[in-house]
Image (tube, rainbow, N blue to C red):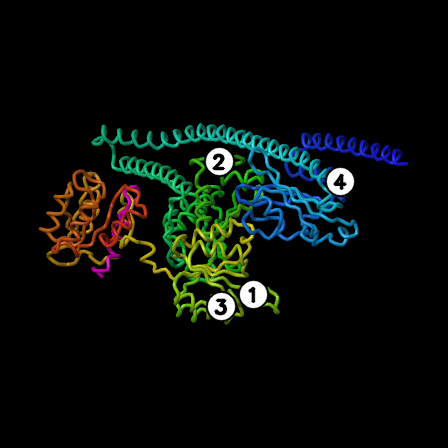
Amino acid sequence: EDGISIFFQDITEKKRDQRQKEVLVEISRTINQARHLDELCVLVAEKISLLFDIPSGFVCVYLYDPRGNEVRLVAPAAIEMEFSQQVVHQRVELGAPYLPARAAFTRELILADQIAESTVASILLDQMRVADLKTLIVMPLVVQGELQGVLELPSIKGKGFITADLEVLSVVGNELAGGMSRKRLMDELRTKNLELESQTQKTLEASDTLKKFLATFSHELRSPLNSIIGFSELITNQFGELPPASIQEFMQNIYTSGKHLQQIINDILDLSKIEAGKLDLHIASYPVSYFRESIERVLAAAIKEKSIKLEFGFSAEFEEIVVDQTRFKQILINLVGNAIKFSQPAGTVSVSSRRVDNDIQFEVRDNGVGIKPEEIQLLFTPFRQATSGREANRQGMGLGLAITKKLVELHGGTIWIESEWGKGTSVHFKMPMIVDATSERILQAGMLLDALQRENYAKDPNVKPLALIVEDSQQASELLRVYVESAGYRVEVAHDGEEAIDMAKRLHPNVITLDLMLPIKDGWQVLKELKRHPLCKQIPIIIVSIIDEKNLGFSLGAVDYFVKPVNKADLLQAIERVHILPKSSDRPPTVLVIDDDRAATDLVQVILENEGYRVLKAFHGKDGVELAAREHPDLVILDLIMPEMSGFNVAYQLKHIPATRSIPIVVLTSMEIDQDTQARMESYISGIMSKSSFTKRDLLREISNIESFR
């Protein structure tokens, strides 16, 4: 009988060995055929359960992620979503609460006789007890010293009877670890190949875009340049022969062509600065009527040429809007200019605004030919223009709407187009409404409370909603806390931009109040990041600004910013604001211009002398300082880039000489002024003008802003 028993036992062992070999072959085949790493782990876990006669749901496979130093539960896939995140993602560290993370940290096999410590015990403990499982095996999967993952499975045998199973499991573990390593490398290689293909495609597209850009750019430059050169040559060679009317017409053509060139260059520079993240917004409060007047003034010629009826319908809910004056005006002028360009003669263009929750929504509508649906999204791509039905109006480089979109987004807003072919186009954009956070304004208008209560009423009345106050000033945050709590909210406070983003992601508040001037990361950057984050983009954000207009807009202590060439009307308006207007006295106000660019100084001289000012000129920094000390002018207009002594040194010296320290300084330069330069010159100057676009009105407005002359 013993011999028969041994015979059958031998047959059973041979069958088991044969089955193990077959399963091992299947595991190897599965590893090779799996399409990706997660699938490999799930399929191999099922094969391992067959090998050891346990339900497949009891075998767990973890993948190691070196970036987060954690092991991630991959198998069993069917019940993964039932586990807590602490189980699915286990931090690999000393004293980790779960066995897989401990095994990954020590890289040593763990045998436990407490089945309840299994990953699946919280879900399948009753089934595990029915199966009479006795030992929990947790095996780190390591290849050539590199951790790949962790394998966890229970056994029906006790610790003292699983030696043979461990030998088989060691073979399986090595095979699985090797397969993980190979599949990981293949996945990385596939990803790199896809990235390379994508990069190659982007390079080809960029090359194609560059070719189109150069072709368009050369055409757009040549056309106005030909006009400037041609008409200038006519005037130069035939000045005495041409009638005054022809000269005036030729000069108007030169001026128009020059402005067109200036617009092209400004568009390219704007787009470059936006793409590089170098375009700073200077936020302040402006009356809505200001922008209406700006549109009518800037586009007067185009409106008159096509006999366009321009209508405005601004909401009475807000008389002021808090934006970057220059950039918001640019948005409106771009959109209204496009609407005029594509309207029929004697058509109508309307500009309207209304409040939508905590946003201000604008609409610019025309009754032109409209845009086909497939072309709408192309309009926001640089150097792309719609062509259908618009051939006669295709002028410019196709940058206007691309820049407009980015400027709207910099303000924390969105823009979109609605158009019906043959019936006109409506361009909509909305931006967050900004509340003036000085206590008097809040108490008078109640805007903050209204906004908060509007959000509150939409929530569960039995649970107090959560408000996140983002404010670095303790006094301001306490004031806001009182207002917000009175609206029925719980309150958390973040004191800088980084903390605000972290708390918003973690707490997911019902509403956020956001200051613009924050340490580490400013409010506009916070707004942009929150609106892009999938967990935060739906959270209502109320911008509460306590920014002083002058400090924000002109951190240099400037009264204005000008870009050459100067426009007469703007120059005179700037001077009017500083109240050094010519008086009926023997001594007119004196302006000293310090600039090595003789053409620029001559232009400023002509503008100001025609308005009754006395103008002094210095072409070197040293001469300018000496002349200022001797003549005591009422104002200095200063270029920054000069030979021998830069404008920075001139400004510094003028502010440190007792006789000249009180003279206001307005910078007129072609140099881009960044934040570092602004900080460097703070308190030295009274304003900045840019040589590429400043006008007569700009210069006079600049002068009129200087406080000491009011």
Residue designated by label 3: 484
Tag of residue 410: none
Question: Which residue ends up furthest to the front in the rendered image?
Answer: 2
Numbered circles on residues, count: 4
For numbered disc 4, what is the local secondary structure?
A: loop
Q: CA distance from mark 2 to mark 4?
A: 64 Å
Please tell me how crowded label 3 is: few (under 14), some (14-19), or many (20+) other residues with Cα within 10 Å. many
Q: CA distance from mark 4 to mark 1?
A: 53 Å
Query: Closer to us: mark 2 or mark 4?
Result: 4
Question: Mark 4: which amino acid?
Answer: Phe
Query: Closer to us: mark 4 or mark 3?
Result: 4
Contact between labelled residues 1 and 4, with CB atoms less than 8 Å apart: no
Is 704 colored magenta in this rendering?
yes
Q: Earlier in the sequence, mark 4 or mark 1?
A: 4
Tag of residue 465: 1
Residue designated by label 2: 384
Range shown magenta? 689-710
Drawn side of residue 637 relative to residue 24, left or right? left
Q: CA distance from mark 3 to mark 1?
A: 10 Å
Residue designated by label 4: 52
